[in-house]
Image: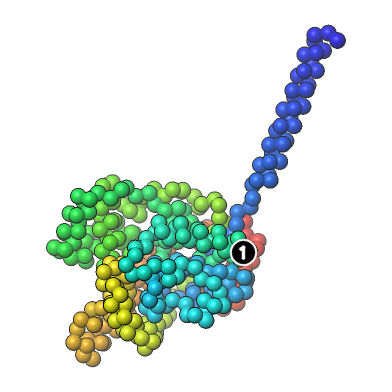
Amino acid sequence: MNNSNTVVEKEEIERIFHNFALEAQKQISANFQQPRKKVIVIAGPTATGKSSFALKLAETIGGEIVSADSMQVYRGMDIGTAKPNAKERESVAHHLIDIRDLNETYNVVDFYFEARQACQLILSKNKIPIIVGGTGFYIHSLIYGPPSGPPSSPEIRKQLEDECQEIGVEALYKRLEQLDLPYAHSITKNDKQKIIRALEIIKITGKKVSKLPWKSKKKMQNYDFRCWYLYRPRENLYKRIEERCDLMISEGLLEEVINLEKNGLKENTSASQAIGYKQALEYLRTERTSEDFNQFVQKFKQASRQYAKRQESWFSKYSQKPVFNWVDLDLHDDEMIKQLIINDYEMGL
C-alpha cells in the first residue's frame, strides 16, 4: 500500500470517528434534555375568588397549592388573610402557609427559594404545582428570578430609620411614590421595612427598585409557567371586598388581633401593617365606641379597595400577555375557565 492510500484511509477513519462522536453527542444531549415541568400560576386581586377557584382546579387535575401570599406564611394570621381552613387544606395540600412565627422575617427572596422547593416536592409526587396569590412582586420573582439588590448600608439605613421616627412612615412612603411609583404601589403604604429598604436601594444605586436587574430577563427556563390572571369589573369586585370585610369581622378578626398582639404582632413591622390588622390595632387603642367601630370598618374596607386597585395596576404593567392570560370571572363560569386552563396545561407550548 502506497503512502497516498494510507493517508486517504487514515482521513476516512478519522472522518468516520468524527461523525460517530458528533452523533453520540447529539444522542447524549437528547437523553439529558428533559422537557420543562409545567407549573400553573393563578393570580388576581384580593377577594376576586381565585383561591376557591384554584382549590376546585387542584381537586380536578390532581394539584397541590403553593401560596403566594406574604401574610399567610405567619401562624395565627388566619381570618384577616383569608387563609384556607382545615377542611380545604385536608382536601388539597397547601404549601408556604403557617411556616413562620411573628418574630421571624419573610421576604421575596425567601419566597423565591421556598416556592421553588415546594414545586420540586409536588412534582416529585407526580402532582401539579398551582401557585395562587395576589402579591405581584412575589409572583414576578418566581417567574423571572429575584431582583439583584445592593448590600445594605448601615449608615444610610440608620439615617432613614431616624428620619422615619421623626416625620413618620407615611411621609417616607409619599417620597417613595415620587421616586418609584410602580414599586410603591406593590406594597402597603405603612410597610416600614420595605419602604426604608426601597429608599436605601434608591439612595445607594440611584435606580428605582422596580427597575433593578432581574437575574433573568426571560422566564426562568427550568419551569414552564402557565399563567392566568383572574379578575372582575371594579364595581363588582369592590362589592365582594366589602362583603368579605364584614365576614372577617363577624368571624372574629378583632379577637384574632387581640391574641396576636400578645404574641408580638406589633413588633413585626410587615404583619402589623397588613390590611385589616393595622386598622384593627388602631381601633383597639380607641375607647371602642360605636363611632370608633364604624370608622374601623370603613377604614378596613377602604384600605382593601385601595390594595385591590394597586394589585390591578401592578399586574396591568408587569403581567400582560403573552405571559399571563387575563380572564373575567364575571363573564365566564368556573367550569369553562377550569377547562380552558386544563387544555392550556395539556396542549400549551
Residue 134 visible? The answer is no
The outermost residue toward the bottom is 290
Looking at the rendering, which quadrant does residue 196 occupy? Answer: bottom left
Dot 1, how many residues are within 10 Å of its Cα: few (below 14), some (14-19), or many (20+)?
A: few
Q: Residue at x 68, y 36 (%)?
A: 25
Of all residues shown, which one is farthest toward the right? Answer: 1
Q: Up-down: is 6 above or below 185?
A: above
The quarter of the picture where the C terminus appears is: bottom right
User: Which of 178 and 106 lies nearest the eye of the viewer?
Assistant: 106
Which residue lies under the disc numbered 1? 125
> In this rendering, would 164 be left or right of 1?
left
Q: Is residue 82 above or below residue 229?
A: below
Q: Return the x and y of residue 334 as percentages of the image width and height.
A: 56, 77
Give the camera-side residue of 124 and 299. Answer: 124
* Residue 326 x/y as whole percent: 50, 67
Instruction: Report whether residue 135 is seen.
Output: yes
205 w.r.t. 337: above or below: above
Is 37 situated left or right of 149 in this image?
right
Q: Viewer-proximal residue, 96 or 23? A: 96
Residue drawn at the location 40% of the way across and 78% of the way down = 78
The residue sitting at 60% across, 60% down in the picture is 124
Left or right of 22 in this view: 41: left
Q: Residue at x 30, y 75 (%)?
A: 263
Judged from the image, the secondary structure of the residue bearing numbered disc 1 is loop
Can you give x and y, in whole percent of width and height, for residue 95 in the image? Answer: 49, 68
- Mark 1 belongs to which amino acid? Lys
Quarter of the image where one finds residue 292:
bottom left
Residue located farthest toward the top when viewing the structure as drawn? 2
In this rendering, is residue 113 above or below 68? above
